[in-house]
Amino acid sequence: MPQVKSIIVVALFVSSGLFGFDSPAAAQNDKRAFKAGASMSNITPPLGELIVGGWRPMPATHIHDELYAKCLVLDDGTTKLAIVLCDNVGIPQVVFDHAKQRASKATGIPASRMLLASTHTHSATTARGPSKVVREDELTDYQQFLVSRISDGIRRAVNQLEPAHIGWGAVDEPSEVFNRRWFVKDDKLSANPFGGTDRVRMNPPRGSDLLDKPAGPIDPQVSFISVRSVDGRPIALLANYSLHYVGGVKPGDVSADYFGYFATYIAKHLGAAGQKPAFVTMLSNGTSGDINNINFTAKTRKRYERYEKMQEVARKVADRVAAAHSKVEFKAWVPLAAAYHDLPLKVRRPTPAMLEYLDRYLSDKPVEGKPRHSREPIYAMRIARLKNAPDVIEVPLQVVRIGDLGIAAIPFETFAETGLELKKKGPFAQTFTIELANGSFGYLPTPRQHDLGGYETWLGTNYVERHASEKIVAKLLEMFETLHNSSKPAAASR
Ligand SMILES: [Zn+2]
């Protein structure tokens, strides 16, 4: 009899340890054991690959600083979660899906509990296919490299799981975020590449008297989650700020932008530079589809050396986080949960007027009296490519719960007002959104912003139906509610 019993115990151990199944016995044994592990996988591309952050792709000719997939795995004794931040401008869903499947097979963590996102550095090489809405199942060499590096990163973080304490906080840094969409006083500034005029202009001329007011808010909040070993050694820090990127790199350089410098400064603040195993800092992008680092109303501007400004911004944000970090209350255990949903969205189609205008462009018959817009060729090409797009795409939505903190994951370049709405309406004490998570489907303006027009709303920059942001927010709030109501009573008291 005793022999039979031990076999059952071994079987339970194997099933919960290796494959991550949530068995009641494992919950009883480990419910108070909170663990964390972190790792960094180098994902620097070979030189010659195309950098795609600007209008014209250019081959990478130098590596200024290495790119990483930074991985954090958390384990509350019954549920494991993986969060990975990749230094890239936008990794498509197909690459993340392959990485999740591979990592899930090796670690037993369900793919639905893996949140994989891009930082949106504009100085990384492309991990995309030709279209944001047509799924390409044949992966390029660099995409395959990303799949294995991300998946290995999750496995290595699991290998390094150790008893840990966790805490979080938030602090405002309003001085480095500016809404980049402006109402302007001259229609010439707000022409679009479809022969029409918008009501707002993205990145208007700085310091111009023709600027009226910004078309949307900013979100000044920097949120962060900190994990350390039980004896106080920093393991990882995940921060979130709604700033597109900073830039100021040398053309042809590969760089992680200010996301990379932030990690260096935080490690210094926490005394974790050069530590083994490495302290891992991930700066995730919040909701920055309409936010950048340019003060449009300033009449004079400081000249910066290359890489100088991104260091200035990274240092400022890191200083703020470090000061707030010193007040964080670390907890020995918190419940973890995640939920995932594929939301169907209609793919936008060109209007007859748009097609007619672009036809004239392609047949080189300009519309009389209309100056040519410099982006017409690009948008004519993007719209032509939409012929192969499906009518409906399913976009991955995800929510994560860490104690009374909620994280929403949206696979678009999301506007600040959407992030602010989720922060306001979410049921948790603290909430933030990671954009470009689990995929990269272009910009996500709200219906109000669609009415105003501007670059982010143009078909070929945005691809999904007008009410997509409202559908996404409604679904995420519903998913948040479900997670919020499903607390784990047996262990929630600590
Ligand atoms: Zn961008």
Image (tube, helix red, strand yellow):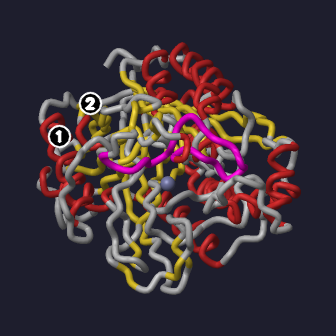
The front one of 153 and 350 is 350
x, y percent for residue 248: 32, 66
Residue 246 placement, left or right of 418: left
The front one of 168 and 89 is 89
Which residue is painted at 18% across and 50% down in the image?
233
User: In the rendered image of this protein, does residue 222 appear above or below residue 442?
Assistant: above
Which residue is painted at 42% across and 42% down in the image?
180
Q: Secondary structure at mark 2?
A: strand
* Residue pointed to by mark 2: 169
* Residue pointed to by mark 1: 320
x, y percent for residue 173: 23, 36
The boundaries of the magenta stretch are: 189-207
Counting labels gives 2
Residue 277 placement, left or right of 395: left
Q: Real-space Cα distance between discs 1 and 2?
A: 11 Å
Which residue type carries mark 2?
Gly
Q: Residues within 10 Å of mark 2 (few under 14, many from 20)?
A: some
Which residue type carries mark 1?
Arg
Which residue is painted at 64% across and 65% down in the image?
128
Q: Secondary structure at mark 1?
A: helix
Do labels 1 and 2 touch, CB within 8 Å? no
Which residue is painted at 64% across and 35% down in the image?
340
Frontmost of labels 1 and 2 is 1
Residue lying at the far front in this picture: please name it: 369
Q: Earlier in the sequence, mark 1 or mark 2?
A: 2
Residue 366 placement, left or right of 266: right
| Residue 199 inside the magenta-drawn segment | yes
x, y percent for residue 91: 58, 59
| Residue 277 inside the magenta-drawn segment | no
Numbered mark located on residue 241 in the image: none
Q: Main secondary structure of the magenta part?
A: loop
Residue 200 visible in the current orientation: yes
